[in-house]
Image: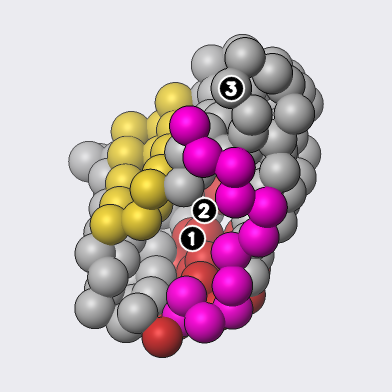
Amino acid sequence: MNCLCEIPATIGSFSLLQELNLNGNGLEDSYICCLTTLPASLGALTNLKELHLEGNQLSSLPIEIGFLSQLQILKANNNRLSSIPSSIGDCKSLAEVVFWSPVELCIHTHFIMSGKYHFGWRTFLHACGCNI
């Protein structure tokens, strides 16, 4: 378990990064979690294939996530997400998306059904426990 409170904007300079694991940024045996936001510069990680954000206190994802054209796996379960940016529909390589959480999550119908936000037949969306 980590205790990261902030991801520096300079993370975007790691353009060759293929996997980023920011899971569990809280204090051990506690519900206190420091990581609540992600920098917009995350969108500069254009070679990123896997993004793991489980077990934080994120309330939103930056709209720049749509620039992650190589992203195949996005796991953001156990956060405080209340919505997903529509720009995620631009992540054409997504094959697995996991958002399960005990809090209310609004996934708009157009996110799943419309042509612009269609990820293809390979995509696995797991939103168990969300009040969709």
Element at badge 1?
helix
Does residue 71 appear left or right of residue 64 in this picture? left
Circle 2 or circle 1, nearest the eye:
1
Magenta-span inclusion, residue 45: no
Circle 2 or circle 3, nearest the eye:
3
Which residue carries the number 2 mark?
114
Does residue 91 appear left or right of residue 80 in this picture? left
Q: How many marks?
A: 3
Which amino acid type is marked by label 3? Glu
N-terminal label among 2 and 1: 1
Element at badge 3?
loop
**Relative vertical location of residue 36 with respect to residue 76 in this rendering, above or below:** below
**Which of 131/78 is in front?**
78
Report, in whole angstroms, how far the alpha carbon at label 2 lies from the one at label 3: 41 Å
Element at badge 2?
loop
Which residue carries the number 3 mark?
28
Q: Which residues are magenta?
A: 1-12
Residue 110, x across and y down, in percent: 61, 50
N-terminal label among 1 and 3: 3
Q: Main secondary structure of the magenta part?
A: loop
Name the residue at 63% across, 33% down. 26
Which amino acid type is marked by label 1? Gly
**Relative vertical location of residue 129 with respect to residue 64 in this rendering, above or below:** above
Which residue carries the number 1 mark?
89
Does residue 105 appear left or right of residue 111 in this picture? right
N-terminal label among 2 and 3: 3
**Which of 126/27 is in front?**
27
